[in-house]
Amino acid sequence: MMESPGPGAAWTGATPFDRETFRQFVAMRVGTGAPVFWYGIGEVSTYPDGRRVLLIEGCDTARLIRPAESPDEAWQLSRKYYVFRDPETNAVIKEYNGKPAPPIAYPYQYLTFRLEGGRVVTSVEQGAGAALVRIGPLDNFILRRLGPDLVVSTPLFLNRETPRGKYEAYENYDFFLRAAEQEPRRRYQMAWNRFADQPAFLGPGRAMLQMIGWRVDRFDDLPSTIRDCIVQDAPMWKEPPKDLDEIRALQK
């Protein structure tokens, strides 16, 4: 255990998950059955010079399914939609130096979480047809306590061959569960960092993507800046997939 400069022990290193902390993490990340909406906003900076070239804003919406036969397992059905914005005008960028600048849009992601001996093991499915990708099982969840609050980190190191060549990336989510708060956007918060190839429309090079975000429990509670984008350009992203049948259809 590491102690803060103040009185009492405020911070601990990684601790095992038990059923209660697993339940708390799942309820934070995916909800309890009704859709939840994670808003994120941040920026894209070139590497290694650190020049801010884009803003990024979006939403990750998710729905929980729990297998009836397994209290130690949970499934996340989700979609992600993020737009790029001009760092000076905040306008949504749809073209950059004459090239299309499409949003980051996942029609679905399917994640499973399973509690095994104090660890959370996860797997991810995304893509369709020949581009269907399955990642995992991964044992990369780190649980820490910050006083009465929980912090769950999920570092991910990607190094694989794709039809377009080798793909390497690092990303990390930190999810914060604030024990003293009740309103979702104050109780559930996150930070995300990613180091990888920069968006293709920027040309070759590496970039850092950084976002902060929070959860709301209704689409209408998202900031209007991203809510209006989804309503106008991507209405399917107003809610997560309804069930596994919808995901299997999207995978074909």
Image (cartoon, rainbow, N blue to C red):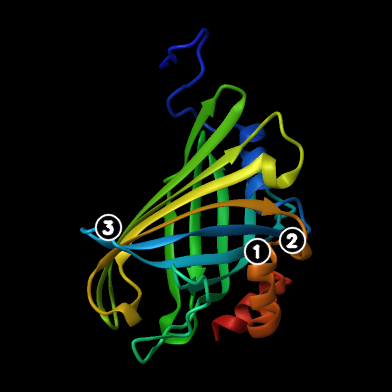
Q: Amino acid at mark 2?
A: Pro
Q: Nearer the viewer, residue 89 or 196?
A: 89
The mark lying in front, picked from 2 and 3, is 3
Residue 225 on image: x %, y %:
64, 69
The mark lying in front, picked from 1 and 3, is 3
Going 53% across and 76% down the picture, which residue do you hit? 91
Q: Where is mark 3, residue-wise?
A: 50
Q: Nearer the viewer, residue 29 or 250?
A: 29
Q: Give the quarter of the image for residue 242.
A: bottom right
242 in relation to 45, above or below: below
Q: Amino acid at mark 3?
A: Gly
107 in relation to 16, above or below: below
Would you say residue 71 is visible in this rendering?
no
Residue furthest bottom as drawn:
98
Q: Give the quarter of the image for residue 39.
A: bottom right
- Cα distance between the residues tagged 1 and 3: 30 Å
- Cα distance between the residues tagged 2 and 3: 36 Å
Q: Secondary structure at mark 3?
A: loop
Q: Amino acid at mark 1?
A: Thr
Q: Tell me if label 1 and label 3 are in contact, CB under 8 Å.
A: no
Question: Mark 3 Cα within 10 Å, few/some/many (few <14, many 20+)?
Answer: few
Report the number of numbered marks.
3
Q: Give the quarter of the image for residue 218.
A: bottom right
Label at residue 61: 1
Residue 238 on image: x %, y %:
71, 73
Residue 251 on image: x %, y %:
55, 81
Q: Where is mark 2, residue-wise?
A: 35
